[in-house]
Image: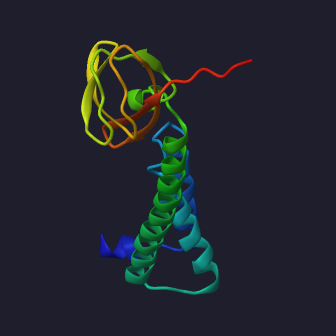
């Protein structure tokens, strides 16, 4: 096995990198992409710098970890921005802007429960609101809805 590893040259690394990229085309969701690119990088590096087999594999492992970490950082940032802007499958964000009639009085600054659709939610208001009034959900603070008295705009 050691003899086989010591005979690795840049062509082997380029072939391994291309083979891993071909496996990625089968739909592995990016798992082999960074392995393949790392193999290609090691092959290109070996064209200019001769390396022992231990250094080749350490370079391959280092490139794999580095490229995977860089991609994860970029993807995590993109996902976080995307999640904050969408409301699909995020029920609490879909509630903002809804208007309902409340059945109980709401005291300013005190958390109360309001019935909305088929569930109840914690809600808080900056003003006193009497039962039977129509309220509008204006913001979400954790799992507490911030509500205000709905005042229709005159046309």
Q: Nearer the viewer, residue 65 or 119?
A: 119
Residue 135 horizontal side relative to residue 111, left or right: right
Q: Nearer the viewer, residue 115 or 70?
A: 115
Q: Is residue 27 above or below residue 115?
A: below
- The part of the image, by quadrant, that contains residue 103 is top left
The residue depicted at 46 percent of the width and 62 percent of the height is 68
Q: Position of residue 59 (x, y in %)?
A: 45, 77
- The part of the image, by quadrant, that contains residue 117 is top left
Q: Position of residue 110 (x, y in %)?
A: 26, 39
Q: Position of residue 86 (x, y in %)?
A: 53, 35
Q: Quadrant of the N terminus?
A: bottom left
The residue depicted at 52 percent of the width and 26 percent of the height is 97
The residue depicted at 42 percent of the width and 68 percent of the height is 65
Residue 77 horizontal side relative to residue 114, left or right: right
Q: Is residue 78 above or below residue 6?
A: above
Residue 91 horizontal side relative to residue 98, left or right: left
Q: Nearer the viewer, residue 69 or 103?
A: 103
Q: Position of residue 138 (x, y in %)?
A: 48, 34
Q: Quadrant of the C terminus?
A: top right
- The part of the image, by quadrant, that contains residue 92 is top left
């Amino acid at each position: 096995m050691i003899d086989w590893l010591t005979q690795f040259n840049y062509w082997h690394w380029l072939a391994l990198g291309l083979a891993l990229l071909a496996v990625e085309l089968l739909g592995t969701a990016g798992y082999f992409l960074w392995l393949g690119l790392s193999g290609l990088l090691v092959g290109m590096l070996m064209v200019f710098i001769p390396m022992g087999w231990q250094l080749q594999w350490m370079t391959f492992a280092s490139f794999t970890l580095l490229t995977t970490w860089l991609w994860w950082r970029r993807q995590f940032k993109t996902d976080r921005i995307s999640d904050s802007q969408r409301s699909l499958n995020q029920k609490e964000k879909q509630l903002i802007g809804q208007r309902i009639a409340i059945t109980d009085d709401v005291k300013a600054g005190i958390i109360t429960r309001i019935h909305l659709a088929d569930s109840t939610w914690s809600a808080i208001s900056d003003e006193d609101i009497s039962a039977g009034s129509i309220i509008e959900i204006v913001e979400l603070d954790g799992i507490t809805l911030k509500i205000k008295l709905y005042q229709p705009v005159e046309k």
